[in-house]
Image (spheres, rainbow, N blue to C red):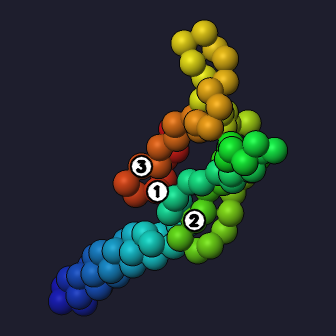
Amino acid sequence: MKIRILVALAAMLAAMLGAQGTAQAEYGHGDSVRYASAKGCVKKNEAVVPCGTWRLVTHHGRVILLKDAQLKALNEKGDPVSGMTAPVAVSGNGQKIA
């Protein structure tokens, strides 16, 4: 009877420690976004305008290009506004981009 109880306790303890170890291993190993940026190009009249694509820089230094994302801001008529970038937001934990 004592052996069965000890085996059951050992199995429960292993399951609890195994579950916590897995959760801790997954947390913090993901690469989340640190910030978003866009390049600025100088025109002939020396005005700086956004050019290229949005770039997401992760905490591990990896750069992800958002090729399909809108870079230049638009006015109410849908025309590009010179010198303004379209808004982009990164969530607090770096897992979501809007």
Query: What is the three-letter code of the residue carrying label 2?
Result: Thr
Which residue is found at the position 33% from the left and 80% from the top? 17
User: Distance of mark 1 from mark 3, alpha carbons?
Assistant: 5 Å
SS state under label 3: loop
SS state under label 1: loop
Residue 18 visible in the current orientation: no
SS state under label 2: strand
Residue 36: x percent and y percent?
56, 54
In terms of depth relative to the viewer, which is nearer, 62 or 5?
A: 62
- Mark 2 or mark 3: name the one nearer the start of the chain: 2
Residue corresponding to mark 2: 58
Which residue is found at the position 68% from the left and 44% from the top? 47
Residue sitting at the far top: 77
Residue 96: x percent and y percent?
49, 47
Residue corresponding to mark 3: 91
Residue corresponding to mark 1: 94
Classify 10 Å Cα crowding around label 3: few (below 14), some (14-19), many (20 and above). Answer: few
* Relative to 48, residue 85 above or below: above
- Mark 1 or mark 2: name the one nearer the start of the chain: 2
The reply to whether callout 1 and callout 3 are in contact (CB within 8 Å) is yes
Classify 10 Å Cα crowding around label 1: few (below 14), some (14-19), many (20 and above). Answer: some
Which residue is found at the position 69% from the left and 53% from the top? 39
Residue 47 visible in the current orientation: yes
Q: In the image, 38: left or right of 23?
A: right
